[in-house]
Image (spheres, grey):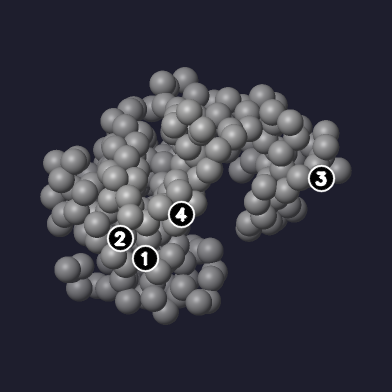
């Protein structure tokens, strides 16, 4: 393998390009079990007709685990939006329709979103009273069976030169209520500082998906709590404003 060309570096992972291969190399903070679980999630998603890169192999590189998949040549939708702001609304609609396509599929093999949220709340570092309230919120919301990407944002959409869209980064995929996936995406826009984009996204998702905005909003304190486990101090104060024992409004 030729690991000279780095595509991205994030959270103890480095992504390389080697010809037609995309090689994601995991650092030592990732357990073997979690890496193999991500590879299995990818395989299950590939069995749908969703536009995703094919996984080629799971291997090791200098003693570190790696997942090799097809390299998709193109630009991320985030790059395209930044380069062509005058057409951001059209790109946003395409983005939302792609997410709704993801959310229209079912995969019973994936971990349940509600179960994953319970686990993240336990690891959030929040006080017992707040954790108890959040656990009750999760139990009071729909279970759902649809595929939820878990990190659906414009940086995880690649548009090729012939205008095909591919969805990448399936590490956080679950089965559950699509409204939770929308709440997570809404939070991603906020964390990126694109408040206007967040509001436009939510309006469009609810309109095109025939989803009540209040239903998405009920998930927001929960997805904010789940984000706390990343341990980002700069985000923590902001996330805590979204986590309240009072009903989210």
Query: Real-space Cα distance between discs 3 and 1?
Result: 33 Å
CB under 8 Å between discs 4 and 3: no
CB under 8 Å between discs 2 and 4: no
229 with respect to 113 (left or right) = right
Q: Is residue 96 above or below residue 110?
A: below
Quarter of the picture holding the C terminus: bottom left
CB under 8 Å between discs 3 and 1: no
Query: Real-space Cα distance between discs 3 and 2?
Result: 36 Å
Specify the label residue 198 is tagged with: 2
Q: What residue does disc 3 label?
A: 4
Picture residue at 34% right of the left edge, 27% below the top: 106
Q: What residue does disc 1 label?
A: 194
Query: Real-space Cα distance between discs 4 and 3?
Result: 27 Å
Mark 4 vs mark 3: in front: 4
Q: What residue does disc 4 label?
A: 83
Neighbourhood count class around disc 2 (C-alpha, 10 Å): few under 14, some 14–19, many 20 upward = many
CB under 8 Å between discs 2 and 1: yes
Q: Secondary structure at mark 3?
A: loop
Mark earlier in primary sequence (1, 4): 4
Mark earlier in primary sequence (2, 4): 4
Quarter of the picture holding the N terminus: top right
Residue 203 on image: x %, y %: 19, 54
């Amino acid at each position: 393998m030729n690991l000279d060309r780095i595509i991205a570096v994030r959270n103890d992972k480095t992504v390389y390009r080697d010809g037609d291969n995309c090689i994601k190399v995991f650092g030592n903070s990732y357990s073997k079990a979690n890496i193999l679980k991500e590879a299995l999630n990818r395989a299950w998603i590939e069995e749908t007709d969703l536009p995703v890169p094919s996984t080629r192999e799971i291997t090791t590189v200098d003693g570190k685990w790696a997942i090799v998949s097809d390299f998709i040549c193109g630009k991320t939708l985030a790059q395209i939006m930044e380069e062509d702001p005058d057409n951001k609304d059209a790109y946003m609609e395409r983005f939302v329709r792609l997410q709704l396509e993801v959310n229209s599929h079912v995969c019973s093999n994936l971990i349940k979103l509600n179960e994953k949220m319970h686990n993240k709340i336990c690891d959030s570092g929040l006080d017992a009273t707040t954790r108890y309230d959040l656990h009750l919120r999760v139990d009071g919301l729909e279970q759902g069976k649809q595929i939820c990407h878990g990190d659906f944002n414009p940086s995880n959409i690649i548009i090729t030169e012939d205008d095909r869209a591919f969805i990448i980064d399936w590490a956080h995929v679950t089965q559950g209520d699509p409204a939770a996936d929308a709440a997570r995406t809404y939070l991603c826009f906020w964390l990126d500082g694109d408040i206007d984009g967040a509001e436009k996204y939510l309006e469009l998702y609810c309109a095109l998906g025939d989803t009540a905005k209040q239903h998405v909003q009920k998930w927001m304190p929960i997805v904010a709590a789940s984000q706390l486990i990343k341990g980002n101090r700069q985000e923590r104060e902001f996330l805590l404003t979204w986590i309240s024992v009072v009903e989210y409004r």
